[in-house]
Amino acid sequence: MGESSDAVIIMVADHLDDVATSVHQRLGDVAGVAVTMAAEDGPTTVGASTDLALQVDHVQFRIGFGPCLEALRGRGGLYVPDLFVERWGEYGRAAAALGVRCCVSIPVERAGEVLAVAKVYAAAVDGLSAEQRALAAELATEVAGTVGLARSLTAHARELDDRTRAMDTRRVIDLALGVIMERAHCFRRRLLDAAQAVAAHQHAARGRRPAGAGRTRRAGRHGRPVRARRQLTTHPSPRTRRPEPSVLWCNRGDGSARSNDVHWKDRGSDKSRSRSDPEELHMSEIRTAPCPTETPSSLGPLTPMATAASVAPVLPVPSAEPEPVRPTSARPARTYDAPVRLPRPRGRVSAALIEVLAGDPRGGVDLRALRWTGDPAAAVTDDDLQLALWLTYEQHYRGLVGVDEAWEWHPELVWARRDWEHQLVDGLRHHLSARPPDVQQAATDREAVQVALNQLAAADDGPSLSKFLMREATTEQFTEFLLHRSLYHLKEADPHSWAIPRLSGTVKAAMVTIQADEYGGGAMPSMHAQLFRSLLEDWGLDSTYGHYLDRVPGVTLMMTNLISLFGLHRRWRGALVGHLAMFEMTSSVPNGRYARGHRRLGGGEQAARFFDEHVVADSVHDQIALHDLAGGLVQQEPQLAEDVVFGARCAAYADEVFAQHVLSCWQTQASSLRLVDGPAVTG
């Protein structure tokens, strides 16, 4: 995708989201309304009124069979009173597990060609009346013009993008070759021959044939074979083919180069794929994730080439130069997180704790001053308690400036924290018990746990912060959102990694598969925390770890404290796994919306990679987390089934409470951040 085609997709998706939401309101009590378009790379849902509708479509595209796909293949409209019948097989069972039993799918046709399918889902068997089905047919008529126009505009936009990209690529390649030729004192032909020789040498070192050896391939410029780039698609096949590895050349910065790193490349992402080769890559929710723009790495000093085998040329990755949207810092990327400065206290307990931490750990601790005496129901969002917890937990991560490291496991401080943790858990149980049941039955085995997690992920009861950020948020509001998220995302994956030594076998392998992707497959620039740092800098914000600690409220601290609580105690390993599973299962769709909001407000394309990576990676991680991680743990240790569901419910509740806080503040034109003495937040 390119800038022009992305703009068309965003415009169409926004419009069809609005249309689907409007029809949903007119229909009344239905589970969701959605519109799926036929595209070159497979079916894609481009408009939906609820996340549940997206989830059901996601399952259908993964399995490769269902009423929507049947209609899309030209087999007419279908009304299915009950999906839980033998005809619909695995899809029907999965949809029923998500809470959908009935649907109607109506093809959108033009000149005899099916362009899209309009769908309405209901929770009850035979839950759509004749009037509701007729209204669904009106939806199909309404979107027909939009879909036809969208296809035409997208085709023209892609042609424009292709021409622009080709021109930019040629310019970048010529410029890079010119620089290398000047520094290495060699001719163009010699440089290209050296590159080919080194590539052949690297393949031979791995026991592989050089590209083109022993087989006929399409000849490119200078008579060398050209390797066509393969892209992953959203084809409705139950199994997606694995992309070919590509060798990436990068400059070490000391004049040497490296070409022995193999990364699995997929469309819309430079992410290092897990070596475990997940069997399915669910990409139906990737609606606006363009291929991120790469810039050539800086060229270090090169010595004249003596032989092709001894010198590896630095080959920049071709791309267009990104157009800067806003001024950003010219300082080099941070590669080290320093300890966090002690913040301002927020109450009696945090003030007493900060005073204790500033002292000598060989002295005594007055536990009475560290006792929190509030109502457990208020513990979840209490500023004083949450800051105290965060400070004691942070000693297990990056540490605190001026605080003796002996405080980390000081017995009296651990005792005080244990009391705070009990208050937090009691508060969570209080709020969860007061909520309507979001899980229909007690989870006692692997299958029941998976059904429960699917039900939680499909629930759409809370306010949608992601939709607000996508459509309505101002620059100031999106900036506040990033400040909130900085407390977790700058150490993303660290809290969940506490689970690794507490798991074993296939469950540990599943956890490591997910975490390896979170840490960029070992490549620092691709680590999710590092991508978020680039996102902050693109918005002109300070990317120092913990910089905005004083500005975020207790509800934000609670979201990270919850993971640390589960991670630091082996007895909560089931809850930690459930939390991560829910985290992954509910990440892809919101991050797609965040990306659209970021771009709508003029955010940089390189910075959007943080969101785009999560759209792609988490569409794979959700299935690993559901089946191999959570399901696998319950199969190994059935006694942890309730803990897994509890952790998932806590994750869903924390997200809901955070969204309520932020949106309620913004609705009254107030800031969702804490007001502290000092200058306004500008980065």
Image (cartoon, grey):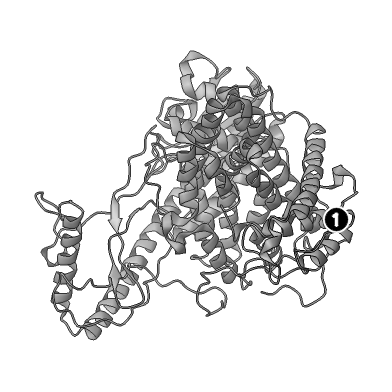
Residue 555 drawn at (x, y percent): 76, 53
313 sits to left or right of 431: left
Q: What residue is shown at x 80% (from left), y 32% (from top)? A: 433
Judged from this view, the residue extending furthest toward the front is 362
Q: Is residue 336 above or below residue 490?
A: below
586 sits to left or right of 665: left
Q: Nearer the viewer, residue 66 or 577?
A: 577
Q: Nearer the viewer, residue 401 or 313?
A: 401
Q: Residues within 10 Å of mark 1 (few under 14, many from 20)?
A: many
For residue 242, which quarter of the picture?
Answer: top left
Residue 402 drawn at (x, y percent): 70, 72
Residue with the mark numbered 1: 370
The quadrant of the picture occupied by the N terminus is bottom left
Mark 1: amino acid: Leu
Q: What residue is shown at x 50% (from left), y 48% (from top)? A: 515
261 sits to left or right of 480: left
For residue 100, which quarter of the picture?
Answer: top right
Q: Is residue 330 above or below residue 83?
A: below
Q: Is residue 485 visible?
A: yes
Q: Nearer the viewer, residue 40 or 320?
A: 320
Q: How many marks?
A: 1
The quadrant of the picture occupied by the C terminus is bottom right
Q: Is residue 536 above or below residue 263?
A: below
Q: Is residue 677 above or below residue 84?
A: below
